[in-house]
């Protein structure tokens, strides 16, 4: 390329080892004139600027891709942050809600504290009670030991009890005997009292043999005034007792007639057995002399000793009353 005086702008030379950008021919450093040096300086500057440009373009492309990556990272981080902020706002509302709950919980905790204090005081009371119970248990344990000792004594006590019950039976027997003795003593006492007053005792009855004479009716009145009647005779033994005790004296007995011609009857209301009594009349009696003999007496010392006589004559007499034991 040749254009007159103008110097070519640049020239590539290729040798075996190097590629270089140079003007038409590599300058020889020694004989290059100063006029030629100016354009080569511009070339260097241009080349440098070109290099700077290329480098900046390369750097920009590299930086651009790096920036894109960074921006996407920032975007991702922003989204994460946004999520966190959302979480935080949600948490904040929950915290607000929880604050109300906390107030309620605080009140409840205060109540629980009060209850706890009450429980504590009750526990103290319970502890005191437990201590008392413990001491009582110790007392009971000692008592139990005493009970054991007593338990061991039970068989012996049982034997003693058997003996005691046997003794008791004996005592009851003795008591009955004593009561019987007491009863018979009282009876004897009653009898003795009656005997001291002149009565005689025979088989459950008292008999009074008078010392003065009276008509039959007066004699009966005397007997009733002493809770008795003129005597009845109901057996051979009694008849024998009476005539023997009379000893030959003549004594009114309680036999009389109902009216002048009536049947015989006993003054003490004992039923009169005419057949059984027939053996006690003196043979030939009752003969009712002058139709005026309506009262009977014991006249002689014999089983057959009865005679009918006038009720108006005065004779000794025999009263009779049954023995009734006095009430204890
Ligand atoms: Ca007669």
Image: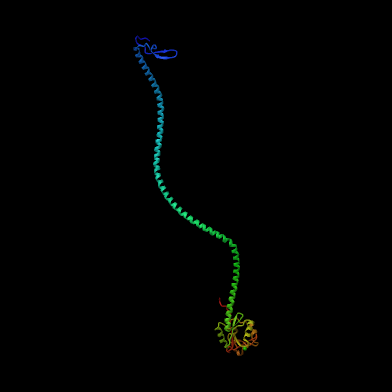
User: Is 211 placed left or right of 39 in the picture?
Assistant: right
Question: Which colour scheme appears in the figure?
Answer: rainbow
Image-based side of 249 in relation to 108, left or right: right
| 109 w.r.t. 145: above or below | above
**Front one among 151 and 313:** 151
Q: Position of residue 328 (x, y in %)?
A: 56, 76
Q: Who's the residue at 41% across and 26% down the image?
A: 66
Give the residue displayed 58% in from the left and 77% down from the top: 185
Residue at the farthest bottom position: 290
Quick check: can you spot residue 124?
yes
What x and y, as percent, mark residue 120? 44, 51
Total marks shown come to 0
Q: Is residue 322 visible?
A: no
- Rendered residue at 52%/57% (across/down): 138
Which residue is at the front of the view, 5 or 260?
5
| Left or right of residue 249: residue 14 | left
Rendering coords of residue 182 (x, y %)? 58, 76
Q: In the displayed structure, would residue 16 be above or below residue 91?
A: above
Snapshot quadrant of residue 228: bottom right
- Residue 321, percent from left and from top: 58, 81
Q: Residue reaching furthest front?
A: 30
Q: Nearer the viewer, residue 116 or 142?
A: 142
Which is nearer the eye, 199 or 74? Answer: 74
Q: On the rendered image, what quadrant is the N terminus found in?
A: top left
Up/down of 12 relative to 318, above or below: above
Residue 70 falls in which quadrant of the image?
top left
């Amino acid at each position: 390329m040749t254009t007159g005086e103008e110097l070519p702008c640049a020239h590539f030379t290729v040798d075996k080892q190097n590629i270089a950008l140079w003007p038409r021919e590599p300058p020889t450093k020694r004989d290059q004139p100063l006029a030629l040096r100016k354009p080569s300086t511009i070339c260097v500057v241009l080349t440098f600027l070109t290099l700077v440009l290329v480098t900046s373009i390369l750097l920009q492309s590299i930086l651009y891709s790096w920036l894109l990556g960074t921006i996407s990272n920032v975007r991702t981080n922003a989204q994460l942050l946004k999520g966190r902020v959302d979480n935080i706002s949600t948490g904040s509302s929950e915290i607000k809600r929880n604050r109300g709950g906390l107030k309620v919980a605080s009140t409840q905790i205060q109540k629980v504290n009060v209850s706890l204090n009450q429980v504590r005081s009750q526990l103290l009371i319970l502890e005191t009670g437990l201590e008392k119970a413990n001491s009582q248990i110790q007392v009971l344990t000692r008592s139990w030991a005493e009970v054991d000792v007593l338990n061991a004594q039970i068989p012996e006590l049982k034997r003693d009890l058997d003996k005691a019950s046997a003794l008791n039976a004996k005592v009851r027997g003795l008591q009955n005997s004593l009561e019987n003795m007491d009863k018979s003593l009282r009876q004897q006492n009653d009898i003795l009292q009656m005997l001291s007053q002149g009565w005689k005792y025979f088989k459950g009855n008292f008999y009074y043999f008078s010392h003065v004479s009276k008509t039959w009716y007066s004699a009966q009145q005397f007997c009733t005034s002493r809770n008795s009647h003129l005597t009845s005779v109901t057996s051979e033994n009694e008849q024998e007792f009476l005539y023997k005790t009379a000893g030959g004296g003549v004594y009114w007995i309680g036999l009389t007639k109902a009216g002048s011609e009536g049947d015989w009857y006993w003054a003490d209301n004992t039923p009169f057995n005419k057949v059984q009594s027939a053996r006690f009349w003196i043979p030939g009696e009752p003969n009712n002399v002058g139709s005026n003999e309506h009262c009977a007496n014991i006249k002689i010392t014999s089983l057959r000793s009865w005679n009918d006589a006038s009720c108006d004559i005065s004779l000794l007499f025999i009263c009779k009353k049954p023995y009734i034991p006095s009430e204890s």
